[in-house]
Every structure is written in C-alpha cells, then in structure tokens.
C-alpha cells in the first residue's frame, strides 16, 4: 500500500509541476491578448454611450 501511495504522490507532483510550467509559458502570451480585448470592449461601450447622447 505504501508503494502505491508513493507512486501516486510522485505522479501528482510531476503533473502539478508540468501544469505550472505550461501556465508560466502561456501566461505572457495570453495576458496581453486578454488585456487588449478588455480595452477594445470598454472602448466600444464608451463610444456607444457618447454617440447615443450626441
């Protein structure tokens, strides 16, 4: 039973480490894209508000 627990612990530790590495690699690419989308969507909302009152 101890061997199974040890094997599972090792496997889950490796999976966690791999996922952390993936997030670290993808985050610098995704963060500016998401920020740009937020800026554009807020800009469109503000533009619609300004043009509807004119």
Image (cartoon, grey):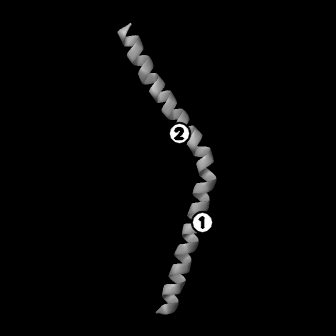
Residue drawn at (55%, 77%) of the image: 11
Q: Decide: few, some or many residues near mark 2? Use Cα within 10 Å; few <14, some 14-19, many ≥20.
A: few
* Image coordinates for residue 24, horizontal then vertical, percent: 61, 55
- Kindly state the secondary structure of the residue where label 2 is placed: helix
Residue 30 at x, y percent in the picture: 58, 44
Q: Residue furthest top?
A: 54
Q: Where is mark 2, residue-wise?
A: 34
Name the disc covering residue 18, or none: 1
User: As displayed, is residue 24 above or below residue 38?
Assistant: below
**Is residue 34 depicted above or below 19 in this figure?**
above
Q: Is residue 45 left or right of residue 15?
A: left
Q: From the viewer's perspective, is residue 53 above or below residue 19?
A: above
> Residue placed at 58% from the left, 67% from the top?
17
Determine whether the residue tagged by mark 1 lies in a helix, strand or loop: helix
Q: Residue at x 54, y 68 (%)?
A: 16
Mark closer to the chain start, 1 or 2? 1
Q: On the image, which quarter does residue 25 sit in? A: bottom right
Query: Residue 31: image x %, image y %?
Result: 56, 43
């Amino acid at each position: 039973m101890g061997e199974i627990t040890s094997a599972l612990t090792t496997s889950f530790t490796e999976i966690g480490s791999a996922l952390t590495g993936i997030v670290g690699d993808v985050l610098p690419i995704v963060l500016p894209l998401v920020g740009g989308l937020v800026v554009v969507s807020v800009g469109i909302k503000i533009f619609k508000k300004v043009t509807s009152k004119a």
